[in-house]
Amino acid sequence: MKLSILGCYSATPRALTNTTSQVLEISNHMFLIDCGEGTQVQLRKHKIKFNRIKHIFISHLHGDHFFGLVGLISTFRLLTREADLHVYGPKGIKEVVTLQMKLADSWTNYNIFFHELTSTESELIFEDEVVEVHTIPLEHRVYTNGFLFKEKPKDRKLDITAAEDAKINVAYYRKLKQGFDVTNEEGKLIKNTLVTKNGKKPKSYAFCSDTVYNESIIPIIKNADVLYHESTFLEKHAHLGPKTKHSTAKEAASIAKKANVGTLILGHYSTRYDSLNAFKEEAKEVFDNVELAEDGKTFDFK
Amino acid sequence: MKLSILGCYSATPRALTNTTSQVLEISNHMFLIDCGEGTQVQLRKHKIKFNRIKHIFISHLHGDHFFGLVGLISTFRLLTREADLHVYGPKGIKEVVTLQMKLADSWTNYNIFFHELTSTESELIFEDEVVEVHTIPLEHRVYTNGFLFKEKPKDRKLDITAAEDAKINVAYYRKLKQGFDVTNEEGKLIKNTLVTKNGKKPKSYAFCSDTVYNESIIPIIKNADVLYHESTFLEKHAHLGPKTKHSTAKEAASIAKKANVGTLILGHYSTRYDSLNAFKEEAKEVFDNVELAEDGKTFDFK
């Protein structure tokens, strides 16, 4: 599981900082999460292959999270993309993208499937054999969802020598990897754990931006390996949180602690601050394993 | 008259090149012409004060000419702009901008006046005491206008010593600057040219992008001091012009020559070419005074 931060600042793109966008590489998927203005240029700078992106998740329709979407969709068209594209986001996202294609008389030559979200309960919005994605209803000034990406339980690791010694027919290896006990060629039941080891632990990533401090998300993100939680403000501006529906670094850390996550990544910083160090310091008062998102930074979670 | 090129490439923004946007400084106005994705960042890099921009002209609704508009309007709001903003562009531009403000529940605290264009004849769309702006109907895949910016005739330059010697009352100085003959304090008619000199020559700038080769624009842009004309292709791809409704550098030069303009600036280059030199060389075969637009370049027309 690998996370590339394309942009992690709030409000507006500037000469050296970008608004929210990130790419999560998980179980061979490349999920694009949010798409602020300039995201397509950030993707190029990161040398991320455009055609590997098949699913885009948009948290909410504030410009710093989605003004780059229509440009990216348009560039996919110019690059003669053929693969389907799935876009998940609040109701209205289809209308605004298609209106711009209509005005430009530039329809895509690939299929776009819009999955418009309206529920205020967490729901499963994507699932295949290896991963599932759930919404995390957030509390912001407009309808907003975070997203929980969860790898499915992985196959057990087969000890082939042990399986051969136990005289198990290769036809049963798939069942062994899935955790079943099987009968060997002599008709004897072989316990699974005798010939397999635990597989890789499935990973999970929770993206929560933008939101005011909101404990109701804790059951959904409980025990996630990694939590990205917005931290727009430092403590000295904590009073702005409830009004603007944003959080402080310390509040993000409090959610991380109560949800018992592995690592907390802070981001969505207000551009009023000159340095990011204070964000980490304030969060660390509450929760130990804190990382700072920075534009261009990649986190590799082995 | 000063022209700052914020972006001059076609199709899509890339790591080192930007799509169309430029700022024309003329008679104390700062006119923004087209607004591709990332224009607001380019404005910051150029240190152009956002609140000096009061008029934005959008040629057409292809993404590389307007996907940065909604972000710029949104950033004006975040910067607590108060001044009115006037946006000139094809019908539909108001709907697409207001839809995005509605979805974001983020209405501007300043007034935006949309001047939607539908005419296929050249029309006067802005005028004040010092400058006027006319549309230049272009022929592209969607409804498109270029824009002709014309300074109004400037006051004549008064030779105060000569006026005093001619015993003209100061109350008549304004009339003298406007070119009238006046009567002096002895009742004698003084010819204007005896006490004034020619004022500064009014300048004009014609922006023509995007368009196929189209001679019908020539009467409108005749004798312009500066013509920016798109040159998407080199001669070797001239066959793509009529199909995509774009021009070659040589065609741009041909228009410049027939319209007898002072300087031709080429731009809107296809991103397929590694170097811009050939654009200049091919244009110079037809017209001598050719300049290449480049992102970040400023032309000062004294």
Image (cartoon, coloured by chain):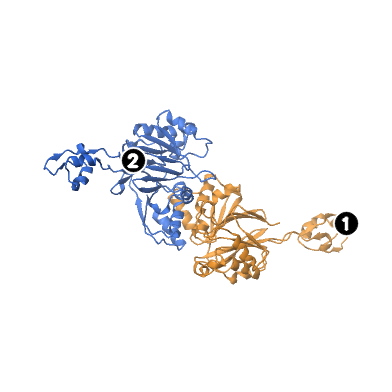
Chain colours: A blue, B orange
Marker disc for residue A204: 2
- Residue type at the position of mark 1: Asp
Mark 1 or 2: the one toward you: 2
Depth check, front residue: B36 or A203: A203
Q: Is residue A103 left or right of residue A224?
A: right
- Observer-nearest of A290 and B51: A290
User: Where's residue B215, x and y in %?
Assistant: 59, 71
Picture layout, residue A196 above or below residue A43: above
| Residue A185 in picture, x, y percent from top left | 13, 44
Judging depth in this view, the residue of B177 and A73 nearest the camera is A73
Left of A44 or right of it: where is A175? left
Judged from the image, the secondary structure of the residue bearing numbered disc 1 is helix
Q: Is residue B75 left or right of residue A223?
A: right
Residue type of the residue flagged with mark 2: Ser
Residue A138 picture location, percent across and down:
37, 41
Please identify the quadrant where the N terminus of chain A is shown.
Answer: top left
Q: Nearer the viewer, residue B175 or B159?
A: B159
Q: Is residue A196 visible?
A: yes
Residue projecting furthest to the top: A285
Secondary element under disc 2, as helix, strand or loop, is: strand
**Image coords of residue B11 (percent x, y):** 50, 59
The residue depicted at 83 percent of the width and 55 percent of the height is B160
Q: Residues within 10 Å of mark 2 (few under 14, many from 20)?
A: many
Number of numbered discs on residues: 2
Mark-to-mark CA distance, 1 and 2: 90 Å
Asked if marks 1 and 2 fall on the same chain, the answer is no
Residue at image mark 1: B165
Kindly indicate the quadrant of the structure image that contains residue A197.
Answer: top left
Tell me, yes or no, if residue A92 can be seen here: no
Q: In the image, is A74 to the left or to the right of B291?
A: left
The quarter of the picture where the C terminus of chain A appears is top left
Q: Image quarter for residue B25?
A: bottom right
